[in-house]
Each structure stands twice: as C-alpha cells, then as structure tokens.
Amino acid sequence: MSSRHGGDLRALAQRSGRSAETLLDFSANINPLGMPAAARAALIAAVNDLGQYPDPACTALRAAIGDHLGISTERILPGNGAEQLIWWLPRLLEARRVLVTAPAYIDYQRSAEVWQRPLCAIRLRPEDGFALDLGWLSTQVQAGDLVWLGQPNNPTGRLVDPSALERFIKAHPQVDWAIDEAFIDFVSGVDSATRWALPNLIVIRSMTKFYGLAGLRLGYAVLSAERAAALARLLPEWSVNALAAAAGSAVLRDPELETFAQRTRQLIEIERRRLSDGLAGLGLQVFDSVANYLLLRVPDADAGSAADLALRLLQAEGIAVRVCSNYAGLDPSYLRIAVRTERENRRLLEAMARLL
C-alpha cells in the first residue's frame, strides 16, 4: 500500500536503500524542535496506566483544551488525530455537496468520496499565488454545502484574513464551514477561529504537528455542543488512547508552553525566509507562505519533473521531500518542503545546488 501523505519513512527508506534513521525528512511538517519536555514526562508517567481503559470522555484533555482556548468543553471533541474527524464530518453533516480548494489537504476530498458526497473544486491559481478569492467563492456556495478551508492551507501555506473570513461565514449561515487549523500554531499573531462560536462553523485542530507528537495521533474538533455530541456518537468510544490524552493535557498545561511556542515561531519565521531565499536563488519558484512549509515549482528545463528531483535527493543525498502530484490542481512540477533547523535547511540547499 502506497502512502498518500509525506512522512512515511519506512517506504522512503526502501526507495532510498538507506535506513529510516539516516534520512532527513522534509516531507512531513513537524516541529523541528521536537516534543516539549512536558509531553515526554507525561508519556513516561502514563505507561503505568496502560493496564486500564482510557477515559472515553477525555475529561482531563477536554478541560485542558477548553482552558487553553477559553471555550466551553461541551464544544470540544478529541479524536484519533485530526484526520479521524475530517473523515467523519461529511457523514455528520450529511452535506449536499463538499467544496474543496484545489490544491488542499487530500483527505477532504477522500472523505467526501468515501461518503459519496458530490465534490466541487475551488480552483486556486498559481498566478495569484494560490490566494482564495472570497468574492468569487460567494458566487459558488449553496445552502447545504460543506466547504473546507485550510488556515493556513496545505500545501500552499496561504492564510485567509481571519477578520474577512469571519464576516464571510456569518454572511452565509446556510453553508457549513470546516476550517482546518492543523498548522495555525506555527503562525504568529493569528487568533483561532474557535473563538467565533458560529453555529455553522467547525474548526479542526491537530496536536501532532506543533507539539511533535505525530506518532500518537491526536486532534480535536470545536463545533456547537449539539454537533459535538452527535459526532461523538459516530466515533468509536476509545478514539483517543491514554498516552495521547496524557501528553495532550500535559503540553497545554505546561508553564513553559508560551516559551516553547515563541521559540518555535521565531525559528520558523527566520528559517522559512532563509530557505525561501536560498531555493529561489537556485532558480526554483517559491510561493509565499506563513506556515512551516513551502510550496515550490521546479522548472522542467532545469531538472525534469519534481518527482525526478525528489528521487535523486532521496537516493543520492538521503533527503525526503513531498512530491505534490496527487494534490488536485497541481501539475507534476511541484514540491512541498518543510522548514527545519538552520543546519538541516543548509544541508537541503547544498544538496539541491549539487543536483540542479
């Protein structure tokens, strides 16, 4: 079975002829600082509780999330990663149509297909920097639609102005809006849409990217209390395991959380600019991003397809990047690259320079 996503180090290791431990992974957008110390300590302590079933209501975790965001716990539903909640949302809402930006995270489309919901693409144009035109979108939506928006979008890294988006959603109360904030914690100075408390809004958040916990699978949805209860009835009772719940609660209640967050954002801002400038200097087209990843286009005349360049990076340099050929709306010339530490980013740029 081939992976539809980045970060599959076992498959990448097989293709590279190297061990997974030796690969430098730019294909998955995980915090390069790794997990906070509070999460590590909580995981060690929680091992003693693995002989018991986890709390199906995730009481402590929901309380920590509620305190962190300043919202009622009745509006919070944790899940086995944000992906589980993404897959069940079209079923919960019984959407007439599902509208998805192209490009966007591919499981919005996959979940619509699984639940046999009609799918409509919202085309984002590279000549516009993949910016979303809300005025045009208003002419496309219909009552009963479910519209997916990434804040910021994956793989483009573009963010819709939050104030404009809040007004826009309020102006379309017959449409359901799902905002995916999986990477918003990496963005400085942006408030979460969870505080808008709109009845037609569902916000999906991940705790695996920013906190370096991808292997635990932990995310949550923020939606109306009635819809949260209805979605909970659709999910398995123990969607969140004891280790994930313990680590999630610990990081959100960590006294050092703000310091960790500031260090992360500062690193990403500095290194994203450095990486973007370096890649552009090699003749690659790099699109503006506010996230911890960059979308870039490989000129065919310089390096063949992006997949060819990615394979050479993997086999010759032991570096994995994300080929974007399975994103709707992107041709085979696009790659997505995570922003990592200065040393790792420098290694990528040096490898790119050798191959290009």
Image (cartoon, rainbow, N blue to C red):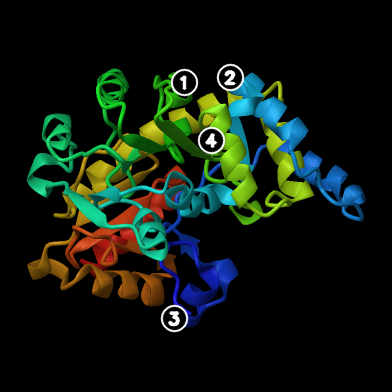
Q: Which mark is residue 227?
A: 4
In the picture shown, does residue 23 fall above or below 193?
below
Q: Are marks 1 and 4 in contact (CB under 8 Å)?
A: no
Within 10 Å of the Cα at label 2, are there few (<14), some (14-19), or many (20+) other Cα atoms?
some
> Considering depth in this image, is 187 or 262 the residue closer to the camera?
187
Image point (45%, 34%), residue name: 202
Q: Are marks 1 and 2 in contact (CB under 8 Å)?
A: yes
Give x and y (percent) for residue 165.
28, 25
In the picture shown, does residue 200 fall above or below 56?
above
Q: Are marks 2 and 4 in contact (CB under 8 Å)?
A: no
Q: Are marks 1 and 3 in contact (CB under 8 Å)?
A: no
1 vs 3, front mark: 1
Instruction: Quote the CA–CA distance across marks 2 and 3.
Output: 46 Å
Instruction: Tell me the amino acid under the disc marked 4.
Output: Arg
* Mark nearer the N terminus (1 vs 4): 1
Residue hosting label 1: 197
Give x and y (percent) for residue 237.
72, 51
Instruction: Quote the CA–CA distance across marks 1 and 4.
Output: 12 Å
Residue hosting label 3: 15
* Callout 4 secondary element: helix
Image point (19%, 68%), residue name: 332
